[in-house]
Image: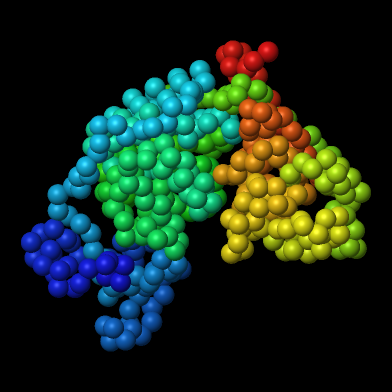
Amino acid sequence: MASEIPFSQELIAEHIKNGYVLETYGVQSENGRFNCVRCGNRDPALFYTFPCRICNRDCTYCRSCIMMGRVSECAQLYRWTGPFLEFAIPDKVMSWDGTLSAGQQTASHRVVDAVSGESEFLVWAVCGAGKTEVLFAAIEAALLAGKRICLATPRTDVVLELSPRLKKAFPSIDISSLYGGSADRHGCSPLTVSTTHQLFRFIEAFDVIIVDEVDAFPYTADDSLHYAVNKSKKFSAATIYLTATPSKRMQRLYRNGTLKAATIPARYHRQPIPVPEMKWCGNWQKQFLKKKIPSVINRWVSERLQQNIPFLLFFPSIQVMEQVIPLFQMLSPKLNCVHSQHPNRKERVMALRNGEVPGLLTTTILERGVTIERLEVAVIGAEHDVFTESALVQIAGRVGRSKIHPTGTITFFHYGKSKAMVETINHIRMMNEAASKRGLLDE
């Protein structure tokens, strides 16, 4: 939109006249059906018509992407149609000198091959396998080939986690980090790390797009984010998907050979993934309402406080978590909570990482993108619908990520086992078994 472009209307008009910029209306209609050019929304329930002061008539805007600024029938969108951008790339772009495990190395070679093509490719790797490091050689190859790359993820927290690692690995490359309120919003870089929401702002911009945590909410539940990813890449672009828990559809496409993939069933430190244990805790909701922590949960927390082991307690909702935080602070006043609506969640996670607090109560917002030494986790009410197999696998994946501390406990406190809980344990055991058979685990 014009309000998002840091150039004058006169300069934009000159570029339109010279054929370098194209303008189009953000919401268009055909045969009485509306279409949002920015997010692809066609759902009639997500459009609203109002008396507009700008065009002085009834005007319709898209409610689906309203969080990124209102796009209406009279609002114009601008896109660059001039020559493709070229960036000055030095001969040496990567300074990372780490080593890859056998599983990582095999996957790395295949991703390098994939970025030179135009097809889709899946990296199916367990939590803690070192997926980011597997990408380094492919990113290097793409940069040296003059390609523009985007690493996209559904979560802002993951952008904040990945950006410093990429900047350290590629110090001579300008890297933009895009998320709501980002200072890099007007930047233009050969390597971009972005939330999938921010890709609404791009069209045919990237030669390579890597979608990390492709199974994560909200990407899995929002077709407009898939539209944003597809719109942001060039027709000849390669698309790489990363996940520890591919959808049933992706697994089916992989097994029938339609989707090529590299699997990494072992962590980089060659130790098995700790297997969760299930513990019955009774009617936890009823006990919380009575201002009591179930005794088995109380004991779990107290043991970790005494042993100085950092921990995360996952809750099914913000409401339940905020209801019980005073109870847990009676065990330790330093305990705190984080959730998607909390403005200081980054600082609170950092406090746990630095040992300033003993543990955090959290929602599924921290199921991914968090690596903390010696961390152990527990899920309260693991039978709740919000804890899908994907979520529980990711939560379990927070434990034992360090080579120095490859073990730890994951506990599912429940009031009745769920299918997702059982499938999570089977999933982790299956990956450990596959890693063992391929010789990727140390004896």
Residue drawn at (58%, 17%), measured in percent from left and top?
A: 440
In x, y percent, where is residue 257?
Answer: 43, 24
**Where 253 falls versus 48 (above or below)?**
above
The colour mode here is: rainbow
Taking the image as shown, residue 95 lies to the left or right of residue 362, namely left
Q: How many marks?
A: 0
Q: Quadrant of the N terminus?
A: bottom left
Quadrant holding the C terminus: top right
Q: Write the residue at 29% across / 36% down.
A: 143
- For the question of whether residue 43 can be seen, the reply is no
Q: Residue 395 appears in which quarter of the rendering?
A: top right
Q: Quadrant of residue 53?
A: bottom left
Q: Position of residue 279 (x, y in %)?
A: 84, 39
Q: Is residue 407 above or below residue 6?
A: above
Residue extending farthest left: 18
Query: What residue is at 23 percent from the left and 63 percent from the top?
Result: 78
Looking at the image, residue 439 sits to the left or right of residue 185; the answer is: right
- Please report the residue visible at 44 percent of the width from the left and 52 percent of the height from the top: 195
Residue 421 picture location, percent across and down: 73, 38
Q: State left or right for residue 96 relative to residue 276.
A: left
